[in-house]
Image: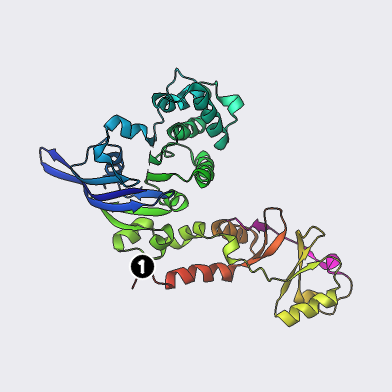
Amino acid sequence: MIRLEKLTKTFDTPNGTVVAADKVDMEVPSGEICILLGPSGCGKTTALKMINRLIPPTSGKIFINEEDTSKQDDIQLRRNIGYVIQQIGLFPNMTIEENICVVPKLLGWDTKKAKTRAAELLDLVGLDSRQFLQRYPKELSGGQQQRVGVIRALAADPPVMLMDEPFGAIDPINREVIQDEFLKMQAELKKTIMFVSHDIDEAVKMGDKIAIFRAGKIEQYDSPDNLLAHPANPFVADFVGADRTLKRLRLVTAEEVVNADAPAVARSTGAGDVARRLASEGERIAVVIDGDHRPVGYVTADEIAGSTGDVGDLAHPLPASVPMRADLRAVVSEMFAHDIMWLACTNDEGRFVGVITQPAVTAALRATYTAPAAGAA
């Protein structure tokens, strides 16, 4: 847990006193990621750097797991906080293993324990430890170096991580990959993380909570869902963008809106039986499945009315399907790409679990926008 209480930072300049952070109050629960977001010069990086005292606060308190950090030595405090920046700063004359082991060794870990930790973390972010431990930074791509920078901050198993635009210098394709790997790692390690970003899409994807800063103050501190559905004021609404409905598609998965009762029939089912079932259930389409319960086609009520034979012989091939873990952005993209109003949805084994429709997607978004924000009276 990280708690900031009236955290303030002022700077004296020739033109007077500048307030970089103005009585910032916020709490990040243990195991969550909080994204600090806002325009340049709004105070988000200053707030982050005060936590590990790279910038000393003018006033206020910082608590990590209920311990007042002002009572700790600066060096010891920093060794217990993972810190990742955009310019990774790997030591070029050290191997990847040596880079990762720097802080554990400073903390007095024995060599075997430190090396074991380095190998575990490399594997955790999709880098084969057998291939990468003895390489030097120059032998890695930028994206690979960034992953090493992240896990180096995790090597000593710190309770808290601070990240200052850690993926900002990575190209969009590698950024998505690294973000995904990081979220997988976070699901396992459950660190408490404060993360500065300038990218609202990254914030929505990565954050459990988002703090929108302006002129040193927090304008709104909320879940991504509430932030997009219920901006606190015009500044927040403008900052998250007019397309905030589309951004919210990332937050909902197909599993949350799938119709698990959609008709599914075996290939060998008679067309007449399927037609009667669709009529009784008021449905227009039945998904045809194979012996492993995988969707392989579909039939419509109009086309099979009066038909004989098995539906497997009458079925159209499925234009596409989506895994139930897919977010609604991916779902809508598939629908637009194939000019269709519905998709079959599958589980991790590729078996049919239901149907997702455009009206269901629209209804899910509408429900959030019409519901009161969490905590509203």
Horizontal side, residue 148 vs residue 259: left or right: left
Tell me the quarter of the image containing the C terminus.
bottom left
- For residue 320: magenta? yes
Establish if 362 lies above or below 121.
below
Q: Residue furthest top?
A: 93
Q: Residue furthest bottom?
A: 280
Horizontal side, residue 322 vs residue 308: left or right: left
Q: Which three-letter amino acid code belongs to the residue tagged 1? A: Gly
Residue 65 visible to the viewer: yes
User: Which is more toward the observer, 166 or 124?
Assistant: 124
- For residue 131: magenta? no
Q: Which contiguous range is marked in magenta?
A: 310-326
User: Which is more toward the observer, 123 or 160?
Assistant: 160
For disc 1, the neighbor class at 10 Å (few under 14, some 14 to 19, many from 20) is few
The quarter of the picture where residue 13 lies is: top left
Residue 242 visible to the viewer: no
Colour pattern of the rendering = rainbow
Q: Which residue is mark 1?
A: 375
User: Which is more toward the observer, 58 or 313?
Assistant: 58
Q: Residue furthest right?
A: 309
